[in-house]
Image (cartoon, grey):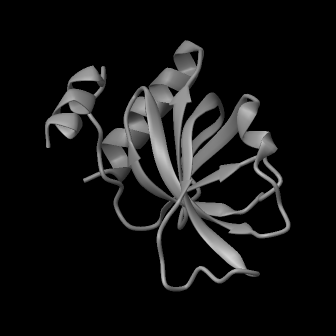
Amino acid sequence: MAESARLAEQRKHQRFSPKEWVSAHCQTPFAGIAALVDISMGGAAFQYVQRSDIGLSFLKKPLKLDLFETVTYHGVKQIECKVVYDTEVPSENNSPGGYRLRRCAVEFGEHDWYQAFQLNMFIKDFTA
């Protein structure tokens, strides 16, 4: 409990839970749609499925992330970010030779005033 309290104190921005139908897409080798777990003005966390034949070396490079509401596709495009952590989510469905469910957290990098405005509106419109 003390560890989670210490981590919470380090956060600069309040985190919000997304409403249903909110997703992320990252220009990476997994190139799939990810389920947004939480978001703040400083970063986001999402879960995605990794194929066993795709390595994770791409996580060491800066990424560009698209966040969107999957019904209307309103969102924010090409937010620069860096990976804070990426870890496998323990699951009975993770098989030795198959797909793996992973959780990734990113920190947003520099963005212009328009992206900051879009991100703020996205958080207001599509989080609980």
Look at 20% across and 24% down and name the residue there.
Answer: 9
Residue 74 at what x, y percent from top left?
A: 54, 50
Instruction: Report the side of 52 relative to 6 (left or right).
Output: right
Horizontal and vertical percent position of residue 13: 30, 25
* Residue at x 71% of width, y 40% of height: 59
Q: In this view, does 99 lie above or below 67?
A: below
At a point 40% along the width and 28% down the height, the residue shown is 41
Which of 114/128 is in front? 128
Task: Return the x and y of residue 116 as percentages of the image width and height.
Answer: 49, 22
Q: Is residue 57 above or below residue 99?
A: above
Identify which residue, 58 or 117, lies in the foreground: 58
Name the side, left or right, on which 1 lies relative to 35.
Answer: left
Total numbered circles? 0
Q: In this view, does 113 lie above or below 17?
A: above
In the rendered image, residue 92, in percent from the top left (x then y), is placed at 49, 85
Q: In this view, does 24 lie to the left or right of 59?
A: left
Choose top left, top right, bottom left or bottom right for residue 7: top left
Dividing the image into 4 quarters, which one contains the N terminus? top left
- Say left or right for 66 vs 21: right
Q: Residue at x 55, y 64 (%)?
A: 70
